[in-house]
Image (spheres, helix red, strand yellow):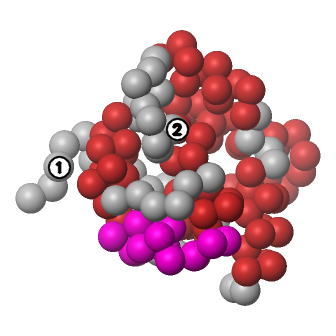
Amino acid sequence: MDNHTIKTVFKEYIHPLDIKIIQKMIDVEGIDKYVKKLNTLSYIRLFLYAQLKKLENLAVISQSVSRKKTVQRLVGMDSISKSQLSRKNRQIPHEITEVILRHLIQKVQYTLGAVKAGKALDKLHLIIHPPFPCV
């Protein structure tokens, strides 16, 4: 995908997310209480970008942010280390991502109807974060 396509698709991915609701959950949970650089909304944007570009691991994601001005503008930061990404992965409660997923599924069902939504969501692949580090 070229940069223009990425920007357009990225905006379409972000658009259905109700940022106010997500921010309220973040505030209630106190997730970003002492965060200076990688807040939860930037994290969500970054991993949406990583999914679009099919980036394989945290090191590649980190390099992509450091090297590409487009990515920096999309996610709102100019660099991030793979260790910071790893820490943020562990820090975010899975309940928040579950709520976001359910919210988006409801929007798809409302927009497409039950039958079409079922077919569209049948192609959905979940990435599960293990509860403990794999060795």
Q: Which residues are magenta?
A: 59-70
Rendering coords of residue 48 (x, y %): 60, 58
Q: Is residue 53 magenta?
A: no
Rendering coords of residue 122 (x, y %): 65, 60
Q: Specify whether 105 is left or right of 131.
A: right
Q: Specify whether 134 is left or right of 75.
A: left
Of residues 92 and 130, the one drawn nearer to the viewer in this rendering: 92
Q: Amino acid at mark 2?
A: Thr
Res. 68 visible in picture: yes
Judging by the rendered image, the residue that carries numbered circle 1 is: 133
Of residues 29 and 97, the one drawn nearer to the viewer in this rendering: 29
Q: Residue at x 64, y 19 (%)?
A: 24
Q: Specify whether 91 is left or right of 33.
A: left
Q: Amino acid at mark 1?
A: Pro
Q: Main secondary structure of the magenta part?
A: helix
* Label 2 residue SS: helix
Q: Residue at x 32, y 60 (%)?
A: 82
Of residues 117 and 27, the one drawn nearer to the viewer in this rendering: 27
Front position among marks 2 and 1:
2
Judging by the rendered image, the residue that carries numbered circle 2 is: 40
* Label 1 residue SS: loop
Asked if 5 appears above or below 106 in the picture, the reply is below
User: Alpha carbon of mark 2 to alpha carbon of mark 1: how far?
Assistant: 21 Å
Q: Residue at x 70, y 25 (%)?
A: 21
Q: Residues within 10 Å of mark 1 (few under 14, many from 20)?
A: few
Asked if 114 appears above or below 23 in the picture, the reply is below
